[in-house]
Image (spheres, rainbow, N blue to C red):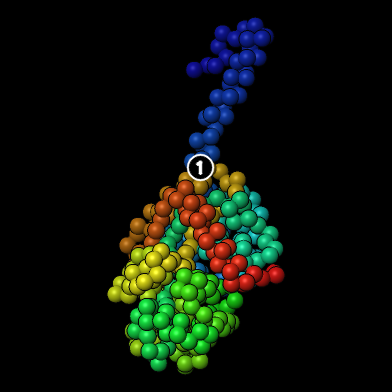
Amino acid sequence: MNVLAGCTRSVTRFACYAALAVLSLTWAAPLHAADYPSRPITLVVAFTPGGPSDVLARIVGKQMERLLGVPFIIENRPGAGGNIAADSVAHATPDGYTLLMGNNSTLATNESLYKRLSYSPQKDFLPITLIGTQANILVVNTSVPAKSLKELIALAQAQPGKLNFASSGHGAAAHLAGELFKAEGKVDIVHVPYKGAAPALQDLIGGHSQLMFATAASVVGHIRSGKVRALAVTTLKRTQILPDIPTMDEAGLPGFEASTWHGLVAPAGAPPAAIATLHDAAVKALRDAGVQASLKRLGVDIVGGTPEQFKAYIAAEVPKWAAIVKASGATLDK
């Protein structure tokens, strides 16, 4: 249809040009949305290559690459508990071409853990989807005479300050899980931080500490070989990788949850059409049988909810961990 047909008088013709301009914007919008993505997407990971976050990002990114038809470039930016990576994405151009594989540290606990944070987890990111959760397993040295969570609590209460719990570092998920256990279980146990999960686990096996909250993927082999004893998992549902181990909730601490979780986010201001496209691709990727098998081996229980559900999940996690950080005095200066 000729929009200018019949526009003979100058005023009428001006109005028609205005109408044509509006129509051109209307027609252009879906074309622009259909063009996304048209170039490589950078997926920033806050940890070193080879770790659980990196492996998860590569598994999911590779499948999204196949679905969207553009390369997914994994960029590792470790340091400062994930804050370096999160800051870089928070201040990236919000065009849908730079994403963060966020986790409970970058999107929830760091806001209260660090006195100075250069980004706001809830204001500077748009949630895409919660990829999944990784259960932390409460494990004890085999010499500890507790065969259940209730027995461990009773033992700790009978010997205040005598039991040590190891962690992968001050402020790490394993540390905060231990602090939550102290608060919920009303026990006095001593935190011993290490520079990483591997040395913490080795000292647990060696008997230098008595208990630890360790990621399922890092400890499942030691559980099966009998080097450590598993008492409970920290997710609200039992984990696929160790389905016979009860949850902390089932074992005696109602509502206890201290899982490690991973989710995709984009910088605030990213186009809604891009967020919708990325969400659709991520959910489809998580339905792939190969992806599901790989993530199961990694100890990840898949979620894949909506952006709104992920936003609500983050909003609930922030105050929960803020209270634990405050109670534990775990705040870091930088």
Please identify the quarter of the rendering in which residue 321 is found: bottom right
Residue tagged 1: 273
Which residue is the extreme one toward the front?
Answer: 158
Taking 291 as reference, is 262 left or right? right
Q: Residue 123: where, in percent of width, then height?
A: 61, 50
Q: In front here: 172 or 58?
A: 172
Residue furthest toward the top?
9
Q: State the residue at coordinates (44%, 66%).
A: 257
Q: Where is residue 80 shown, x and y percent of the image?
A: 64, 70
Quadrant (top left, top right, bottom left, bottom right) of the C terminus: bottom right
Which residue sits at x=64%, y=50%? 93
- Return the residue nearer the eye: 264 or 210: 210
Q: Nearer the viewer, residue 242 or 32?
A: 242
Q: Position of residue 139 (x, y in %)?
A: 41, 81
Task: Name the amino acid, label 1.
Answer: Ala
Asked if residue 210 shows in the view, the reply is: yes
